[in-house]
Image: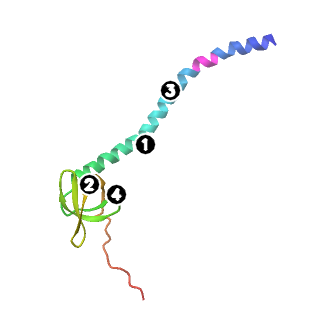
């Protein structure tokens, strides 16, 4: 019994010495991978959205965060007036505009007829 106790006691410090450094290397690698695959693409997307909002001009077709489709009628520093339907206009915060739908708009806007 004493021999086993001495053998295990001598082996324990050797295992602990290398474990500390490899733990920190793994933690650093984990944060590096998380930054590369999650944080970096999100920042890139955020910058593109900010650029889009700053380059808005009258006549652009946009979609708001609430799903309202409209055409930009007027732009101020913090808000945008969008023409929704006919003469209906809404003033929305510039940050609520999420994308341009000019390229997404269908070429044929006719409704299918039921027979």
Q: CA distance from mark 4 to mark 1?
A: 22 Å
Give the label, 4 or 3, closer to the camera.
Answer: 4
- Res 38 → quadrant: top left
* Cα–Cα gap, marks 2 and 3: 45 Å
* Label ID, residue 47: none
Q: Nearer the viewer, mark 2 or mark 3?
A: 2
- Local packing at callout 3 (Cα closer than 10 Å; few below 14, some 14-19, many 20+) is few
Mark 4 or 1 closer to N-term? 1
Q: Which label is found at residue 25? A: 3
Query: What kind of element bears circle 2?
Result: strand
Residue 48 drawn at (x, y percent): 29, 49
Which of discs 4 and 1 lies nearer the camera? The answer is 4
Q: In the structure shown, which secondary structural element does the residue marked by tag 1 occupy? A: helix
- Image-quadrant location for residue 14: top right
The image position of residue 64, as x and y in percent, is: 31, 59
Q: Which residues are magenta?
A: 14-18
In the image: residue 31, left or right of residue 60? right
The disc at residue 38 is 1
Q: Which residue is mark 2?
A: 93
**Magenta highlight on residue 16:** yes
SS assignment at label 4: loop
Residue 3 position in % (x across, y down): 79, 11
Residue at mark 4 to residue at mark 3: CA–CA distance: 41 Å
Near mark 4 (Cα within 10 A), the count class, few <14, some 14-19 or many ≥20, is few
Residue identified by numbered label 4: 65
Instruction: Tell me if residue 23 comes above or below residue 37 in the rendering.
Output: above
- Contact (Cβ within 8 Å) of mark 4 with mark 3: no
Quarter of the picture holding the N terminus: top right
Q: Nearer the viewer, mark 1 or mark 2?
A: 2
């Amino acid at each position: 019994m004493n021999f086993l106790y001495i053998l295990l006691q001598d082996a324990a410090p050797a295992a602990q010495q290398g474990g500390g450094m490899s733990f920190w290397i793994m933690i650093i690698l984990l944060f590096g991978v998380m930054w590369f695959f999650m944080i970096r693409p999100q920042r890139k997307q955020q910058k593109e959205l900010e650029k889009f909002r700053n380059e808005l001009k009258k006549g652009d077709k946009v979609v708001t965060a609430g799903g309202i489709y409209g055409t930009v009628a007027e732009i101020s520093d913090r808000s945008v007036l969008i023409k929704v339907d006919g003469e209906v206009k809404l003033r929305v915060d510039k940050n609520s505009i999420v994308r341009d739908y000019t390229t997404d708009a269908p070429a044929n806007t006719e409704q299918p007829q039921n027979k």
